[in-house]
Image: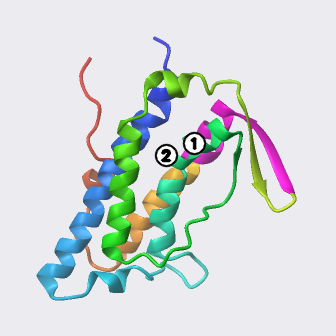
Amino acid sequence: MAISLYDATVANYIQTVTAMTGVLDRGLTHCTDNGTDPNALVDVRLFPDMAPLRFQVVSIVHHSIEAIEGVEAGEFGPPTDQRPHDYAGLQGILADALAALKAISRERVEVLQGRPCAFKLGATQIPFTGENFLLSFSLPNFYFHCATAYDILRSQGVPLGKRDFMGPMRVGG
């Protein structure tokens, strides 16, 4: 059985963004239960030279729904969302991304195969095909930022486990 570009990307984005929505919900519950302000988590970093939770969540959105949109446009660059999101704002952009991902049709993604897409960073331009960009650049970045957001919350005492990260698996035949 062949796997489609939609199955390899959007289906995985939906599964993991759903999981990350739950992870942020668990973070909020943890703060509520312990009488702490969830907004204190927004700027937490694992290490001083790493980006904070805010950037991780923005990047999850960027490397999922915005990656599909980037391939459609033929170019993609670093995240442009520089808004100072609070915790509820991060939950909101994740919910919006999930809704947008669920609205994407299989056909919309399958036509991206072979389409040129350039990653642009200043004067640097890296040429990809749509599928190579999504599978070898955006999807690994997506998982990196998901894992880092999870790790930031876990480092702050949020009771999370592997099942929280994995989200709703696609089981059965």
**Residue 169 falls within the magenta-colored stretch:** no
Question: Residue at 24% across / 22% down in the picture?
Answer: 172
Question: Residue at 40% across / 68% down in the picture?
Answer: 151
Q: Residues within 10 Å of mark 2 (few under 14, many from 20)?
A: many
Q: Give the CA distance from mark 2 to mark 1.
A: 6 Å
Q: Amino acid at mark 2?
A: Ile
**Residue 64 in view (yes/no):** no
Q: Which residue is mark 2?
A: 65
Give the magenta range.
Answer: 124-139
Q: Quadrant of the C terminus?
A: top left
Q: What x and y, as percent, mark residue 30?
A: 19, 76
Residue 165 horizontal side relative to residue 120, left or right: left
Q: Are marks 2 and 1 in contact (CB under 8 Å)?
A: yes
Name the one closer to the observer, 57 or 72.
72
Name the one closer to the observer, 163 or 69.
69
**Residue 171 in which image quadrant:** top left
Q: Residues within 10 Å of mark 1 (few under 14, many from 20)?
A: some
Q: Which residue is mark 1?
A: 69
